[in-house]
Amino acid sequence: MKKSKEKITKDLNISDVIKKYPETTFVFMGYGLHCVGCEFAELDTIEAGAKTHGMDDETISMMIKDLNKVAGKKI
């Protein structure tokens, strides 16, 4: 199956990203977003969830790069 060329961005919903790229679960958890299975993952964007967990913009950017890498994307 060919992967979409859609880049993962901070504005995407956490749950949508996990559904499309299940392998990203480990990246989220590695950055302390253990809420991947909770109701807030259905509501929050990646940025909103990260900020709720105290992440700064630089860390969010690093996480987005890692999410794209794991999902097989080129940045």
Image (tube, rainbow, N blue to C red):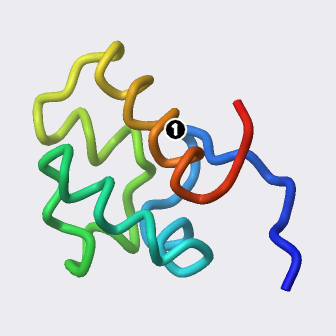
Q: Name which residue lies at 43% across and 63% down.
A: 24
Left or right: residue 32 compared with residue 67: left
Q: Position of residue 6 (x, y in %)?
A: 80, 53
Left or right: residue 47 compared with residue 28: right
Q: Name which residue lies at 74% across and 38% down.
A: 74
In the rendered structure, which amino acid carries the disc numbered 1? Lys
Q: Name which residue lies at 56% across and 45% down.
A: 69
The one of 30 and 40 positioned closer to us in this rendering: 30
Q: Name which residue lies at 17% across and 40% down.
A: 52
The image quarter in which residue 42 lies: bottom left
Q: In the displayed image of the protein, which residue is found farthest to the bottom?
A: 1
The one of 47 and 2 positioned closer to us in this rendering: 2
Q: Position of residue 7 (x, y in %)?
A: 73, 45
Q: Residues within 10 Å of mark 1 (few under 14, many from 20)?
A: some
Give the quadrant of the N terminus. bottom right
Give the quadrant of the C terminus. top right
Q: Position of residue 56 (x, y in %)?
A: 24, 18
Residue 67's place in the image compared with 44, above or below, is: above
Which SS class for mark 1? loop
For mark 1, what is the residue? 10
